Amino acid sequence: MSRGAGIVAALEHAIKGPVWGCQMCGQCVLHSTGLVCPMTCPKTLRNGPCGGVRADGHCEVKPEMRCVWLRAYESSEELPVWRHHIDDLRPPVDNSLKGTSSWINLVTGRDKQTPAGWTAVADVES
Amino acid sequence: MSNLERKLDAGEFVVTAELPVIDGGGHAEIMRQLAPMKAYVDAFNATDNPSAHAHASPLAVAIALIQAGVEPVMQLTCRDRNRLALESELIGAAIHGVQNISCLTGDDVTAGDEPEARRVFDLDSPQLIALARVLESGRYLSGRTTGPAPHFLVGGVENPGAPPFAYRVRRAAKKAQAGARFLQLQICYRTELLEAFMRDAHDSGLSKRLALIPSICILRTVGGMRFVATKVPGIDVPAQYVERVERAADAEAECFEIAYELASHALAQPGVAGIHFISFRKDAGIAKLCTRLGIPPRVGRESKERESNGDSASLAG
């Protein structure tokens, strides 16, 4: 990572860390997930809640925490835009982007690159 | 094409069942487990470290099931393997003719007896379903060729009984979009939630896009009922069921009654493509329950299907 990119990444984390618990995955999908970060799900699920959500809506792994995806679903229903983005099939996380700035990756289009084989999946998020 | 795929394509009612976990005991143990339910079941799920407890691997058990002359549904979870391991497991399954695949997220390691293990979750279950479709195109995820493309009947699970209830059908639709052709539904003791799920699936057309198969658990003891009620993630058991088994003079008989009630209810829902059993009884619990529900053995169902096909053909002619 260049020095400039490092500074942008640090700035991004300084802002998004306290607000959304940003984990710096480098391929931000907050707008698709009701502005709740899916990387704060203990299973880092990108496509909705697992089947282990407790009856009280709390997390299977961390019983003290409300399910991240329950919050994502509820708040996406409140959003004036992007409401149905939650239904998009999001591709596997690119782990090589961890720690990089999603802002830079958005501008360069790097965050939209998927492995060549994934093109067989017709309806990936565009 | 697997028998399960052929039946689902033809719209025939299917019966699947979970093979109890296999540890030691080899093929003899698998044969012993199969014996009491073999006649009724179209395909057996080979589980993948359920409740995050280690057991014989699903691929090894699936191969043993084929050798035993029955059809497996190989479960794969995202908990223990990264994408490379999932790809090799699927390609390995194809070598042995294991075509029915059920893709799950997987219970967290904290639900198991080795909570100190590293959880993986490199993919999630919709992505795993899509990965199987990628392999079916004759490519690995990287784009590298697999040689002749394997063929799978890819499915998954959904839990109508876990929040957010209103979102569950949309999540199931996402799995259909990813390529799932069947979903085995998690055991659901809250009948109103299964009802709402099946109604929404029917109204939205989802039950026409993939086969929805509710699960019924046949328990045996008060301890078993308490375990499901308190220890299995995502299953909410209303207190009345636990109390019924606690009060019963014969806990096993009461558990059977509950399974019968829930199965009758599930079968009455619109768009049900089959039924999935998980039995903890030592005897022929699944066979008994099928008999009581009026579900004939596999051979009987198949010949009945042939007759009705013959009838419609002669009518058409």
Image: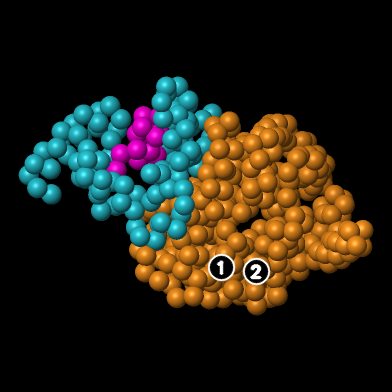
- Which residue is found at the position 24% from the left and 32% from the top? A17
Q: Give percent across and percent down for residue A112.
A: 31, 47
Q: CA distance from mark 1 to mark 2?
A: 8 Å
Give the orange chain's letter. Answer: B
Out of A71 and A30, give the one closest to the viewer: A30
Residues at circles 1 and 2 in contact by the CB criterion of under 8 Å:
yes
Which quadrant of the view contains residue A78? Answer: top left
User: In this picture, is B288 found above or below A84?
Assistant: below
Q: Residue B80, image x and y in percent?
A: 43, 58
Highlighted range, magenta? A26-44
- Residue nearest the viewer, comparing A55 with B168: B168
Q: Are marks 1 and 2 on the same chain?
A: yes
Left or right of B60, for residue B282:
right
Q: Which chain does the numbered disc 2 sit on?
A: B
Q: Earlier in the sequence, mark 1 or mark 2?
A: 2
Whether residue B250 is in magenta: the answer is no
**Looking at the image, which residue is at 63% across and 45% down?**
B186
> Could you tell me which secondary element the residue under label 2 belongs to?
loop
Q: Is residue B180 left or right of residue B138?
A: right
Please provide percent x and percent y for residue B277: 71, 53
- Residue A4 rendering spot, x and y as whole percentages: 8, 41
Q: Residues within 10 Å of mark 2 (few under 14, many from 20)?
A: few
